[in-house]
Image (tube, helix red, strand yellow):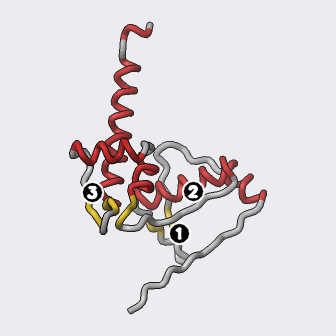
Amino acid sequence: MTAMLTTENITIDDTDVRLAGETPHPQGATLVLRAADGTDVELPERIQAMLLATLTSVAENGEATIGRLPDELTSTVAADILSVSRPTLMKWVRQGRIDSFKVGTHTRFKREDVLRLQAERMEERRAAFAALREDKDWD
């Protein structure tokens, strides 16, 4: 069996960008597909988040790109995803903060490990920001 890479490009124009910007996305809104017979199908939460992020990107940047990360990432790609330098990423490997493996002489990372660390770092930043906001010394 041969794996094939297929891509679908959707071209948008200025009207699409304007409409994306005018489309409200209230907090807590739910995206639903409505079938021809009127049946509503609620989309999974992750799909809703992806579609809303796409809508926001079109509204703000006039474009959106959706892609899937490969199962194995190079150190350069992993560092980019984590918004750190490659040397910092390699230091984290030595410290045991993230697992890696070798392909020949090249260091690789599992997509899931990189995304897990990305989520952990985001949560750490949110917690730190919340702590700063609660700090009484700011008054």
Q: Residue at x 46, y 66 (%)?
A: 68
Q: Amino acid at mark 3?
A: Ser
Q: Amino acid at mark 2?
A: Thr
Rendered location of residue 110, percent (x, y): 31, 61
Q: Residue at x 29, y 55 (%)?
A: 113
Identify residue for label 3: 100
Q: CA distance from mark 2 to mark 3?
A: 31 Å
Rendered location of residue 57, percent (x, y): 61, 52
Placement of 41 over or under 116, stated as above or below: below
Sequence-first disc among 1 and 2: 1
Label 2: state its secondary structure. helix
Q: Nearer the viewer, residue 90 or 139?
A: 90
Sequence-first disc among 2 and 3: 2
Q: Residue at x 57, y 47 (%)?
A: 25
Label 3: state its secondary structure. loop
Which label was assigned to residue 34?
A: 1
Rendered location of residue 107, percent (x, y): 32, 59
Seen as rendered, the residue at the extreme right is 14
Identify residue for label 2: 54
Front position among marks 2 and 3: 3
